[in-house]
């Protein structure tokens, strides 16, 4: 096929009526065609995309170029920075011969000035940046169990914790809250066992051990408050350029569970927070996920289903997702089939397995008579890539090899002073702060709830003891000698002693109250009492004798008493004259 035919097909295949951005220049027979610019329609970016290629082939620079073009068109982006090399987006790039030679290939359609772009540097670990976190409540039981590496039984306990908190309108925000709930509230709470399910002590021990491991890995930097408001990631500056939110994740490179959990949490929160908008002329937000293999390298079907579901549905929220990884095989097939934009840099084929993989990938691209795709995939130079995308009418564009446009910002990292300046100028710094403080104390709400539970438990325990004592007394009374209505006749000695008791009370009252008449006029001193002990009935005795028996412990709050005029026996607490002694 001739050069002119190639130009016509590519021009028609990448023609766009709406907003678009140039990303490269077409290559035919290993020669770039000057002025034959390949652009991507911004409207279709919510159909998601993929940037793939071996290490060192130019993936990061491609990501950088696309993020720059989005910002120029007023589209904010979120970029996961696991290597720390995306900070250069904040400062202008420098002119050099190689970059200028590539810019000239665009024949005037890429004459943008070198510039820095509005950037927020964020961090969820110990990296420098504005601190962002996610509360336990927002992460949810499934993702939390995934982080902790729990089995089904242990995951069930975490689900019970979340359900109970939801029913009782309690919030779990930090790891400290979770540990406090599991070790304190579950232990004191009979309601959980009765209405939600049994919680095994062995499983709780395992959960606590895994929480300790999570804390050692830095999970307490991710989990906490204040929680991220995703609307803070959808911002434009005064010039209406989209703000690039770079989330530094260099500390999570060797912690795939934390990384994937954070990504899933962020996607889920975007989906649940943002309103439905349908198809827009340009997306509200584009999210770049570098090292995407960490997201899909998981055998948990629930997690995989959640990822695939969110990816399919989030486009209606005006959000586009662009994955960045070494090979398309890293991406789930169900997700790969949803991607409209594909930019494939060079692949390595050093083994027979690699060559088979390259052959299969070549078959995933649209058929073309312009290139030997299988051969070219392993011979692309740095900054070269195969591209195919969805046109505005929803049909795929023809496959084309391109030389990527060079970035307008710095192709490198920020120096420490530059990084500190970007962080200090962030409008989010005052809201979230820059220190990833670890909260080690549970919330006051949970502590108050625990205190109330303890009071309730103590009351229940006392009531249970009282009920047991009452049952015990009933058994004793049932086996005791039948009570007579009239007391037995007293012996002469007892009659003489009881006759002396009013005088004893009189003198006692005189010494306490300073008046002889107070003792003589006290009618209670003449009252006779009967009481039961160990199934036996005793009496009659005086009030003074009852008082002494209370003080000695012979009579307590559960002892039954009777005095003339009463219809039935009653416990000692029902006698007002003994209240002070029984307290």
Image (tube, rainbow, N blue to C red):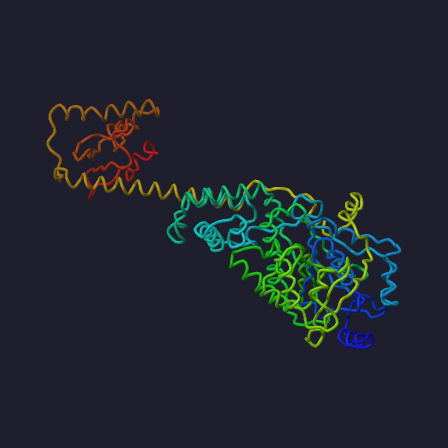
Task: Tell me the quarter of the image containing the N terminus.
Answer: bottom right
Q: Is residue 158 depicted above or below 540 in this figure?
A: below
Residue 359 image-quadrant placement: bottom right
Q: Position of residue 157 (x, y in %)?
A: 45, 50
Nearer the observer, 449 or 152: 152
Q: Position of residue 481 (x, y in %)?
A: 12, 37
Q: Residue furthest front?
A: 352
Q: Position of residue 146 (x, y in %)?
A: 53, 52
Q: How many marks?
A: 0
Q: Is residue 3 depicted above or below 467 in this figure?
A: below
Picture residue at 81% right of the left edge, 76% below the top: 2
Residue 405 image-quadrant placement: bottom right
Picture residue at 89% right of the left edge, 56% below the top: 97
Picture residue at 85% right of the left edge, 66% below the top: 106
Nearer the observer, 185 or 228: 228
Nearer the observer, 472 or 363: 363
Asked if residue 361 lies left or right of residue 281, the reply is left
């Amino acid at each position: 096929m001739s050069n002119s035919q190639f130009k016509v097909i590519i021009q028609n295949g990448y023609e766009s009526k709406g907003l678009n951005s140039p990303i490269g220049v077409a290559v035919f027979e290993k020669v770039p065609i000057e002025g034959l610019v390949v652009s991507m329609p911004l409207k279709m970016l919510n159909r998601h995309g993929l940037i793939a290629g071996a290490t060192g082939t130019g993936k990061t620079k491609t990501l950088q170029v696309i993020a720059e073009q989005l910002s120029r068109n007023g589209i904010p982006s979120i970029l996961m920075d696991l290597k720390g090399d995306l900070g250069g987006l904040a400062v202008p790039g420098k002119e050099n011969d190689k970059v200028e030679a590539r810019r000239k290939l665009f024949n005037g359609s890429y004459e943008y000035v070198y510039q820095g772009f509005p950037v927020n540097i964020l961090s969820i670990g110990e990296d420098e940046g504005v601190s962002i976190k996610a509360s336990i409540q927002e992460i949810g039981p499934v993702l939390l169990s995934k982080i902790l590496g729990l089995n089904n039984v242990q995951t069930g306990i975490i689900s019970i914790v979340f359900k109970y908190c939801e029913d009782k309108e309690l919030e779990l925000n930090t790891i400290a809250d979770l540990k406090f709930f599991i070790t304190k509230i579950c232990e004191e709470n009979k309601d959980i066992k009765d209405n939600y399910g049994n919680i095994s002590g062995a499983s709780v021990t395992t959960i606590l051990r895994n929480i300790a491991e999570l804390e050692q890995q830095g999970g307490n930097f991710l989990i906490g408050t204040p929680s991220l408001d995703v609307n803070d990631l959808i911002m434009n500056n005064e010039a209406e350029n989209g703000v690039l939110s770079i989330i530094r994740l260099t500390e999570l490179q060797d912690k795939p569970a934390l990384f994937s959990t954070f990504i899933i949490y962020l996607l889920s929160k975007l989906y649940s927070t943002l309103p439905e908008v349908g198809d827009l002329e340009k997306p509200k937000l584009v999210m770049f996920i570098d090292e995407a293999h960490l997201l899909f390298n998981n055998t948990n079907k629930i997690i995989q289903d959640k990822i695939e579901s969110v990816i399919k549905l989030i486009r209606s929220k005006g959000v586009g997702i662009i994955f960045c990884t070494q090979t398309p095989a890293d991406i789930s097939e169900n997700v790969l089939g949803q991607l409209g934009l594909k930019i494939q840099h060079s692949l390595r084929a050093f083994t027979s397995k690699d060559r088979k993989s390259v052959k299969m990938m070549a078959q995933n691209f649209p058929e073309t008579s312009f290139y030997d795709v299988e051969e070219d995939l392993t011979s692309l130079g740095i900054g070269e890539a195969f591209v195919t995308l969805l046109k505005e009418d929803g049909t795929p564009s023809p496959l084309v090899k391109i030389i990527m446009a060079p970035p307008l910002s710095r192709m490198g990292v920020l120096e420490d002073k530059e990084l500190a300046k970007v962080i200090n100028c962030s409008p989010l710094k005052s809201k979230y702060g820059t220190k990833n403080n670890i909260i080690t104390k549970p919330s006051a709400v949970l502590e108050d709830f625990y205190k109330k539970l303890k009071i309730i438990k103590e009351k229940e325990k006392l009531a249970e003891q009282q009920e047991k004592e009452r049952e015990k007394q009933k058994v004793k009374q049932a086996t005791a000698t039948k009570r007579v209505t009239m007391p037995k006749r007293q012996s002469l000695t007892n009659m003489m002693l009881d006759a002396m008791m009013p005088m004893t009370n009189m003198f006692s009252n005189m010494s306490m109250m300073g008046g002889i008449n107070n003792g003589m006029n006290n009618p209670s001193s003449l009252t006779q009492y009967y009481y039961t002990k160990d199934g036996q009935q005793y009496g009659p005795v005086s009030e003074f004798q009852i008082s002494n028996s209370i003080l000695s412990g012979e009579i307590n709050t559960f002892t039954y008493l009777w005095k003339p005029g009463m219809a039935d026996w009653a416990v000692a607490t029902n006698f007002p004259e003994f209240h002070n002694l029984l307290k």
